[in-house]
Image (cartoon, helix red, strand yellow):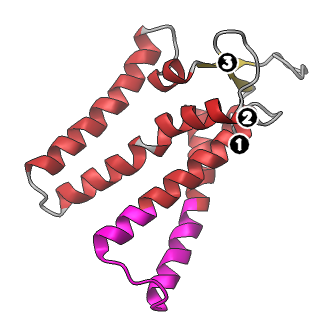
Amino acid sequence: MVAALIDLALTGVIGAALLVALAWFRAANLLQLADLAGHLISAGTIALVATVFLAGFEASPLEASPGKKALGLRVRRHSDGDRLGLGRALARNLLKLGLPAPLAYLAVLAAAEGGGLEAWVGVGAAAVVALTYLVGVLFGDGRAAYDQVAGTAVIRALPGRRFA
């Protein structure tokens, strides 16, 4: 959880910078978007950048996002313990963050704007996704659903060793 908070803080800084840039473009009338389009572009851009950012670290020789690295954790292929390729790292982070986060954001936004039953169903679906991730960790083999689908596992690296 601490690793996720560190990564969230780092991706939050990047996301905030992107939102400021988008707001500047909109204020300067260089980019004219309807409110919904602006929200879609904002949510999608931040999710895409965060997904690529985290996947890049996990597929690199570091084998971990900054938060995981700080706690001595690494992400490896579950089947054989080898390093992740970029494709598997992207799949893992897309399922973990890249799809659920913007969908939850847009569902909550729609519900807050009085979007009706469909918006609240979206909020419920986002909550179910979060619970599914938690249940997989607590009651499965210790891996979240996105790790199971991507075929990955988070492992503890031995101190002072380059490889786990």
**What's the residue type where badge 1 is placed?**
Gly
Please say whether residue 109 is one of the residues in the magenta stretch. Answer: no
Q: Residues within 10 Å of mark 1 (few under 14, many from 20)?
A: many
Q: Position of residue 142 (x, y in %)?
A: 52, 12
Residue range in magenta is 15-42
**What's the residue type where badge 3 is placed?**
Arg
SS of the residue at dot 3?
Answer: strand
Please say whether residue 36 is one of the residues in the magenta stretch. Answer: yes
- Residue 123 in the image: above or below residue 157: below
Whole-angstrom CA distance, mark 1 to mark 2, is: 5 Å
Whole-angstrom CA distance, mark 3 to mark 1, is: 15 Å
Of residues 31 and 64, which is closer to you in this image? 31
Q: Which residue is mark 1?
A: 56
Which image quadrant: the N terminus?
top right
Look at the image and tell me whether residue 66 can be seen: no
**15 horizontally vs 164: left or right:** left
Q: Quadrant of residue 41?
A: bottom left
* Residue at x-position 59% and y-position 68%: 17
Q: Which mark is residue 77?
A: 3
Q: Position of residue 97 (x, y in %)?
A: 48, 41
